[in-house]
Image (cartoon, helix red, strand yellow):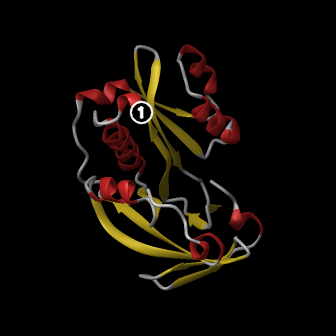
Amino acid sequence: MRSYSFIEKYILKKRYIFYYDLNNISKNNSLTNVIDLSLTQTSILSDFVISERLNAYIQKRKGMDTWRLFLYIENYQVLGYSFLHTPLSTEWNDSLPTYNNEARESSTYVESVARGRGIRGILLASQKKYCSEQNKKMWCVIEAVNEASIKSTKKSGVNYIEKNYLLKFFGRNIFSILTNTLSFFFLWGEKRATR
């Protein structure tokens, strides 16, 4: 992953929004290794070995019933995880709205010892299955500098890609612009919420 330039960090950042194809969900036996839970049900996590990184994400979102956590587990160890933002009404997250008929994939990570085994795809298939059952569109945002994630996501069944630009003022997001639908969002208050 290349690093951010001065312009990307303080003036204008380019991102991509990927809309997933929910009609193409892989049927994988490894889905049995995935646990899907609401962040109001975190007591189950005491049975598993989790990283400090995942624990920090959980603590940040603990008790928020609009977030679901998907865990890939082998031998009581979490080898991969991904969050899904599933609001009941429009909520702002990372300078974009997520509507009540949508779900947004966020913070996907596979431990380095488990990479190359298709765990990200298994987590994604579980999330797609959940969204299909809940009748929600599913999407994610990837920053333009994250070339590996862009490449991987393009392979995982995407219907549509849209560009998103964040106009910044001294590093703070001021406007979020979607190019394909030509939508402009003035970011104020909770609309600036971090992910």
| Residue 144 placement (x, y as % from top left) | 45, 67
Residues 24 and 178: in front is: 178
* Pick the front one: 135 or 83: 83
Q: Residue at x 38, y 54 (%)?
A: 149
Query: For the N terminus, which image quadrant?
Result: bottom left
Instruction: Give the residue at x 49% y 55%.
Output: 104
Residue 132, position in %: x, y? 35, 49
Q: Going by the image, does 32 lie left or right of 91? A: left
Q: Residue 166 versus residue 136: which sits nearer the camera? A: 166
Going by the numbered disc 1, the residue's amino acid type is Ser
* Residue 1, placed above or below residue 55: below
Residue 155 horizontal/vertical position (percent): 25, 55
Q: In the displayed structure, does residue 187 sit left or right of residue 102? A: right
Label 1: element kind: helix
Would you identify the image quadrant in which residue 175 lies? bottom right
Q: Residues within 10 Å of mark 1 (few under 14, many from 20)?
A: few
Residue 74 in percent (x, y) is at 38, 19
Which residue is label 1 attached to?
Answer: 112
